[in-house]
Image (spheres, helix red, strand yellow):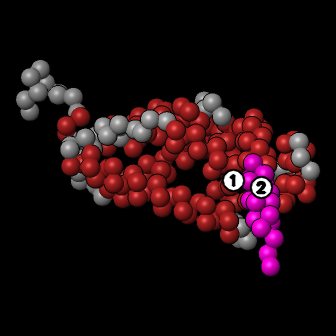
Amino acid sequence: MSDPRAEPRRRGAYAKGVARRQEILDRAIEVFAERGSDRTSLRAIASAVGVTHAALTHYFGSLEELLIAVYLASGDADGEREPPSDDLTPVGMMIESARTNREVPGLVQLYSSLIATALEEGHPAAKEFATTRFARLREELASRIAAQQASGLIRGDVPADAVAALVIAASDGLQTQWLLDDAAPQHEALAALELMLRGSASRAPSGGDGAQ
């Protein structure tokens, strides 16, 4: 016969484990926000976070899994923000994101490291993270682009999914240039892309009364 006291103990241990994992994760986010990943060993990260190497391995398994958990958890705060307005174009969303990312260059470096790792053999977790993220972003942005093409905010003579892929590529590529050289015209280049994608409804009239 099972001990009726065992289940509450198990639930209590599980809750404590979840809380401890979150505590470690919160501290890891602070560490990575300050200094990025730097391809540091799990042991070195454990020291910086203030836990044992065994504890970090227990909760996250590997360095790759920890990096993914840190990046995903750091993005949870973004979900608490007001959703973007319907008239904010995908490029405009990337411009706002770039402004925010400049405040936490360590996490930007972490993201870039994860994408680079995903391209290497033998890193299935990073590959799944990257491919899932890109597929989700393309789908979300393509839906927004199609709606804005219908309203004339974005030019309608280009496929929405192709525009979505282009916006993501431009954003990530410019972000990499900024990491290497903070003088790179990240915002200006995105603004130029925005201008090229504008539809007739958002174009300023060329003449005094707008007649062509």
The residue drawn where x is 59% and y is 44% is: 75
**Secondary element at image label 2:** helix
Return the residue nearer the eye: 43 or 202. 43
**Residue placed under numbered mark 1 in the picture:** 69
Q: Seen in the image, is 3 located left or right of residue 164?
A: right
Mark 1 residue crowding within 10 angstroms, few (<14) / some (14–19) / many (20+): some
Quick check: can you spot residue 130? Answer: yes
The residue drawn where x is 65% and y is 39% is: 179
**Secondary element at image label 1:** helix
Residue found farthest to the top? 208
- Label count reads 2
**Residue placed under numbered mark 2 in the picture:** 12
Q: Position of residue 209 (x, y in %)?
A: 9, 23
Quick check: can you spot residue 119? Answer: no
Three-letter residue code for mark 2 = Gly
Q: Nearer the viewer, mark 2 or mark 1?
A: 2
Q: Seen in the image, is 171 located left or right of residue 53?
A: left
Q: What stretch is highlighted in magenta?
A: 1-19
Q: Position of residue 125 (x, y in %)?
A: 68, 65
Residue 103, compared with residue 22, is above or below; it is above
Residue 177, compared with residue 211, is above or below; it is below
Three-letter residue code for mark 1 = Ala
